[in-house]
């Protein structure tokens, strides 16, 4: 039996084989399942022989619905939150309910599983040490180009969700904002029969999507390599060596203060160099 809590349960993003056993068990044993779309989720529940009652929940649900769910949780019942696909709250409803549960002192337990952004990143071949999930870009062209221009200098891998009927227009805007050479991956229909990864320069990927209408169908994650790191601080070789050795053993602020004493180079400059060049 589950401990009373709000369980945030991930469901598959296409392939039912990705439903984790703990998700099935949780959905079977809670008192109630709050779902983005009850009709959509009813099919998933039927497949896994889950008979738990469903109630509709989305972030536009009135505060009365949130209060009702919190009251049931506070009375010691368990509630599960699911969305149509993947992990709730990731470009999906649930934030209001989780925030309210935490504010009310209710235990909130994640039951992790599929998530399109992570699935796409893990197989994209792009740097995964630092990434920024940007959700959906604005649908209107002017706002979308403005947002892309703001992101063009970001050195992290950027990840977007995109609608199939907008992918080509977005790739056009991306070429304009990031330049034709930036590496791009279009990850489509993940975990499903027609899963594809298209990768190459922004210009190449745009042309391939333009030339193949199949690439403008289904569900899409768009990934963009980060901008190359620009080094603004130059250090002589000895200062670089001292800073590198010290920073391997000490926090960077302490390392730069000590390196200043050894090399005579200002600690601010040493610190800045370290931040810009660290892997
Ligand atoms: N909560 C979900 C998750 O964890 O990935 C995302 C929900 S969001 C409303 C739906 C968007 O996620 C789609 O428009 C698409 O961009 C992306 N997505 C969901 N499933 C996908 C799949 N199987 N392949 C590629 N992208 C997918």
Image (cartoon, rainbow, N blue to C red):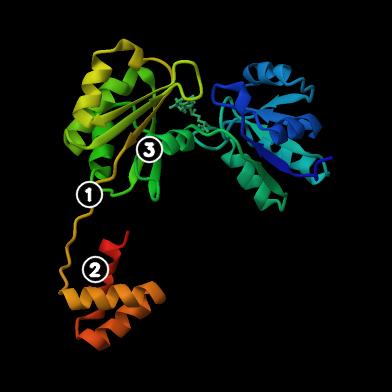
Task: Tell me the crowding category of disc 2: few under 14, some 14 to 19, or many 20 or more residues within 10 angstroms, Cα based.
Answer: some
Dot placed on the residue nearer the N-terminal end, 3 or 1:
3
* Quadrant where the C terminus is found in the figure: bottom left
- Please name the residue that numbered disc 2 is placed on: 273
Q: Nearer the viewer, residue 95 or 135?
A: 135
Label 2: element kind: helix
| Image spot of residue 47 (x, y percent) | 70, 17
Q: Name the residue beneath numbered marker 3.
A: 159
- The earlier-in-sequence mark between 1 and 2 is 1
Q: Is mark 1 within 8 Å of ligand 1?
A: no
On the image, numbered disc 1 is attached to which residue?
228
Q: Is 275 left, or right, of 117 in this rendering?
A: left
Q: Quadrant of residue 136?
A: top left
Q: Is residue 192 above or below residue 116?
A: above
Q: Residue at x 24, y 16 (%)?
A: 210
Indicate the position of residue 60 as horizontal and vertical percent values.
Answer: 57, 31
């Amino acid at each position: 039996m589950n401990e009373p809590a709000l369980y945030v349960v991930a469901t598959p993003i296409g392939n039912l084989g990705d439903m984790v056993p703990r998700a099935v068990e949780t959905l079977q044993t809670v008192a109630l399942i709050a779902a983005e779309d009850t009709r959509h989720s009813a099919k998933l529940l039927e497949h896994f022989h889950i008979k738990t009652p469903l109630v509709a929940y989305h972030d536009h649900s009135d505060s009365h619905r949130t209060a009702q769910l919190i009251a049931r949780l506070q009375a010691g019942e368990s509630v599960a939150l699911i969305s149509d696909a993947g992990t709730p709250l990731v470009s999906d409803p649930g934030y209001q309910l989780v925030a309210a549960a935490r504010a009310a002192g209710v235990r909130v337990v994640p039951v992790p599983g599929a998530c399109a952004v992570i699935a796409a990143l893990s197989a994209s071949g792009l740097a995964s040490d630092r990434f920024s999930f940007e959700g959906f870009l604005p649908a209107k062209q002017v706002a979308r180009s403005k947002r892309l221009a703001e992101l063009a200098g970001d050195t992290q891998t950027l990840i977007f969700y995109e609608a199939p009927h907008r992918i080509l227009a977005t790739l056009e805007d991306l070429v304009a904002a990031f330049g034709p050479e930036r590496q791009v991956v279009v990850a489509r229909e993940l975990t499903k029969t027609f899963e594809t990864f298209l990768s190459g320069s922004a210009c190449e990927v745009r042309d391939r999507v333009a030339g193949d209408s199949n690439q403008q169908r289904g569900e899409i994650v768009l990934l963009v390599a980060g901008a190359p790191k620009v080094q603004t601080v130059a250090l002589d070789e000895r200062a670089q060596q001292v800073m590198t050795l010290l920073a391997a053993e000490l926090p960077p602020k302490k390392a730069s203060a000590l390196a200043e004493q050894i090399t005579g180079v200002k600690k601010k400059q040493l610190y800045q160099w370290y931040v810009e060049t660290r892997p």
